[in-house]
Amino acid sequence: MACTCEVIGLACVVALILSATAKAPYQMRMFFIFFGAGLIVFLCVPFMILRPRDYRNALFPSWCFRQLCRLVGITMEVRGLENVRKDHGAVVIMNHQSAVDLCVLAYLWPVIGRATVVSKKEVLYIPFFGIGAWLWGTLYIDRSRKTDSINSLQKEAKAIQERNCKLLLFPEGTRNSKDSLLPFKKGSFHIALQGKSPVQPVVISKYTFMDDEKKTFRPGHALIHILPEVSTEKYKREDVQLLIDECQSIMQTEYTKLSKEGQALSSKKQA
């Protein structure tokens, strides 16, 4: 009986070790990404203070972060650069999957134009990264105070027109790694309609190389496609749902197509 208990106990220990080993690459890579991002920003903050709230403050950190992504086995490819127009502003909408979207922003920042990101206020309190993001122009909104959020976004709508800014948002509102995009929230589109600014969809292929639920993370490749702008001239404010439906349809079609290609490229990288 004692022998049986010992065998069962040993089996449990082995199972725990194997489970921890399987998750270790995920945990190590995510730690490396977050710690590395914080360290990069910490080293750059003294220089960014010289020109606060300037999108150019993120150019060097984004270069460093792209190198960091390569070190953990993530590579990305940006397509559709011919669709970027820097002579006017736009509301740039992207699908949101995980913290690895930081890599996407690092690839987009040098090519999209005078960019700024809208983020939840909690990000501001992440050591080093929060203040660094503020210094390169990130707009923090308090989701619990709707009036303040609307006022902040109205200011950004004005900035899009006056300074040709590109306002980067995640219209799904939360992380989503499923095959279908979540219904888009209206905030991004109200901003576009208010300023009569175009909406520029950006689609990122599904991260088939990682799974947040199963805690798996392997080397992989992702595709970022900057799609042509969607004009808002034909839409009135009360037509916001029609604009949402058009953009969501365009992005879902491209997301399905791009994810298949991205999965094939990631499989080759892992072979």
Image (spheres, helix red, strand yellow):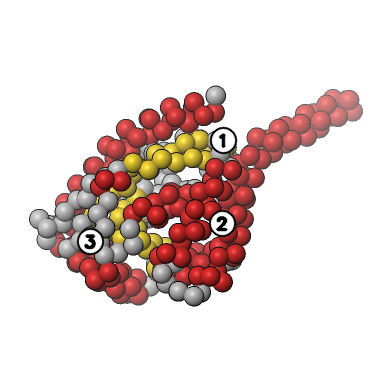
Q: Amino acid at mark 3?
A: His
Q: Residues within 10 Å of mark 3 (few under 14, many from 20)?
A: some
Disc 1 element: loop
Quick check: 75 above or below 117?
Answer: above
Is the residue under label 3 in contact with that under label 1 (CB below 8 Å)? no
Residue 15 locus on image (x, y percent): 72, 32
- Whole-number angstrom distance, CA of label 1 to CA of label 2: 19 Å
Residue 12 locus on image (x, y percent): 76, 33
Report the residue marked by disc 1: 218
Mark toward the viewer: 3 or 2: 3
Report the residue marked by disc 3: 88
Q: Amino acid at mark 1?
A: Arg
Compared across the picture, whether 265 is left or right of 64 comes to left
- Whole-number angstrom distance, CA of label 3 to CA of label 2: 30 Å
The residue lying toward the viewer, choosing from 43 and 97, is 43
Q: Earlier in the sequence, mark 1 or mark 2?
A: 2
Residue at 43% over, 38% down: 222
Q: Earlier in the sequence, mark 3 or mark 2?
A: 2
Q: Which quadrant: the N terminus?
A: top right
Mark toward the viewer: 1 or 3: 3
Report the residue marked by disc 2: 37
Quick check: 137 above or below 70?
Answer: below
Q: Earlier in the sequence, mark 1 or mark 3?
A: 3
Q: Residues within 10 Å of mark 1 (few under 14, many from 20)?
A: some
Q: Which quadrant: the C terminus?
A: top right
